[in-house]
Image: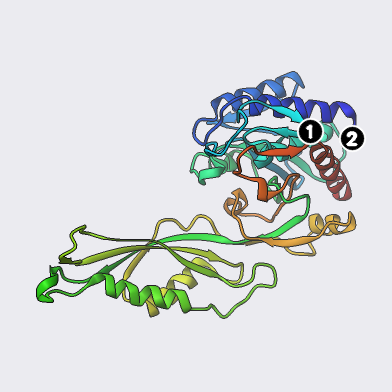
Amino acid sequence: MSNSLYDSAVLLLKQLIATPSFSKEEQGTAEIIAAFFDQHQIEFQRVGNNLYAKNKHYDINKPTLLLNSHHDTVLPNKGYTLDPFAPIEKEGKLFGLGSNDAGGCLVSLIATFLHFYQKENTAYNIVFAASAEEEISGVNGIELVLPELGKIDFGIVGEPTQLEMAVAERGLMVIDCIAQGRAGHAAREEGENALYKAMEDINWIKNFKFEKISSLLGQCRLSVTVIETENKQHNVVPGQCKFVIDARINELYNFDEIQEVFKLNLKSSFKPRSTRMKSTSIALDHPLVKAGIQLGKGYYGSPTTSDKALMPFPTLKMGPGDSARSHTADEFIYLREIEEGINCYIQLIEQIL
């Protein structure tokens, strides 16, 4: 890797940090990335706040590798002591909102794409996509741009993993449940208490264990995270009680199987809000994973979800930075992590090109 790639990546990241890019409000950072592509004479397309580019010698007859990360951020939390939009360098760190999640990954992948952009006679095409709305799993993010990219065979999703390989990822299904009873006056012991009916289901959810345990992701996890009744009066037996299940699913189950288990065991009615965020995995003998192992990288199953869940092809989640720093006050990334990220991505891709 040349120093110019690293310097360009850090400068770009500072510009991105200085520009608010909350989910659905990424226009400013989209323009910055577009300007970067223009500066380096890279042809690109924009779909909403998503941008994508193909390598100069793209060949429709070759298989294609996608490089992807997102440029939206969460809102800064109240614990910040620094200006979240001030890219501050201090003690080998670059501070700022989105520096770690996922700005470091994004600019490292852009630098990597730039490195390979003009190469000829490669085994694969390389397509780069900077996506929007990742933090809210929005429909105008990676899903909006994927149909524009042509056939993609596999991909690298840039998220902070300390440059280890996340080869599997839990799926997320949020389920709204309703326990039905019959309202009545509490003093006269009238009605059927929907809250008690909900409690029976919640107790089952608390204690139920799915049989299939993943070597990468462990057990599926069910958590009841919200509960409410239709009335707020102390003397009324609630006729309806709503609660929400947060279901984190390993790669050994699909969402239909999970819902079948609910049908057999829950007395409450239920409905998934969405079944988009599916569990995913990439085979350990996939060329990308084998290349990473040759570079001395370890692999694991990730408990968090990302745009990887929305891609209908094998993807490896991997990038500089640390997931533990994501969404924290005074977020930062070590500058050396960006340098290591660019080097790692280039070496990984060179193994398969």
In front here: 231 or 70? 231
* Residue 89 placement (x, y as % from top left): 75, 28
Q: Which residue is mark 1?
A: 111
Q: Earlier in the sequence, mark 1 or mark 2?
A: 2
**Mark 2 and mark 1 in contact (Cβ < 8 Å)?**
yes
- Picture layout, residue 294 above or below residue 10: below
Q: Between 127 and 261, which is closer to the camera in this rendering?
A: 261
Placement of 316 over or under 331, stated as above or below: below
Horizontal side of 160 relative to 224 (left or right) equals right
CA–CA distance in space, label 1 to label 2: 9 Å
What residue is at 46 percent from the left and 74 percent from the top?
206
Check disc 2 and report the residue beneath it. 1
- Residue 228 sits in quarter: bottom left
Which of the labelled discs sits on residue 17, or is there none? Answer: none
Tell me if mark 1 has few (under 14), some (14-19) or many (20+) residues whose alpha carbon lies within 10 angstroms of its own: many
The residue located at (75%, 48%) in the rendering is: 63
Is residue 54 visible in the rendered image? The answer is no
Q: Is residue 270 visible?
A: yes
Helix, strand or loop under label 1: helix
Residue in the image at 67% along x and 24% along y: 15
Query: How many marks on residues?
Result: 2
* Residue 188 % position (x, y): 9, 75
Q: Quadrant of residue 294?
A: bottom right
Q: Nearer the viewer, residue 218 or 30?
A: 218
Residue 19 percent location from the top left of the image: 60, 25
